[in-house]
Amino acid sequence: MDNEHPLPIVLFDGICNLCESSVQFVIRHDRQSRFRFASLQSEAGRRILDEFQYEANELSSIILIDNGELSRKSRAALNIARQLDGAWPTFYFLFFWVPPFIADKVYDYVGNRRYRWFGMKEDCWVPDESLRARFLDGSDETR
């Protein structure tokens, strides 16, 4: 697949409080504004998943599109941490050696309980005007 998306894109569950907090965390620690975001429920999110022929039967995983590749769950989280400012890339170097089948079990344990532990919204989170440019609306995935 050619790289139609020059900037990394994070796809997240837009009704999950934990996921929203995670996106806000990434925004705070991405001072160069490298990342773009879209909810998995959005038109832009569905279109990107279609481009990568990814079946999104459930919305239980964070997905990172970067350099023409799709990563999900623990690998997506580690690859995001690797690009953040400050000491956060250290997490990548500490945990990248953990095989995905083990790291994803931990990810799934939290993911399967995220609504119960952190709650959920009835509607997808809508960023305020100051963040809107970093979110894909379906019309221009590469802005």
Image: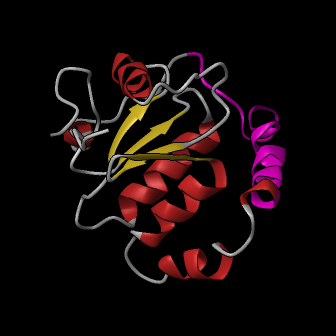
- Could you say which is closer to the camera, residue 28 or residue 51? 51
Q: Is residue 11 left or right of residue 97?
A: left
Q: Main secondary structure of the magenta part?
A: helix
What residue lies at 59% left-to-right and 16% top-to-bottom?
A: 122
Residue 85 percent location from the top left of the image = 37, 75
Q: Which of the 4 image quadrants contains residue 116?
A: top right
In the rendered view, tell whether residue 73 sits above or below residue 85: above
Q: The C terminus is located in which quarter?
A: top left
In the rendered view, tell whether residue 66 sits above or below residue 121: below
What residue lies at 32% left-to-right and 53% top-to-bottom?
A: 67
Residue 63 percent location from the top left of the image = 52, 42
What residue lies at 22% left-to-right and 38% top-to-bottom?
A: 4
Is 111 in the magenta?
A: yes
Q: Which of the 4 image quadrants contains residue 83?
A: bottom left
Give the extent of the magenta segment: 102-122
What residue lies at 54% left-to-right and 48% top-to-bottom?
A: 21
Residue 33 percent location from the top left of the image = 24, 58
In the rendered view, tell whether residue 114 sits above or below residue 44: below
Q: How is the image coloured?
A: secondary structure
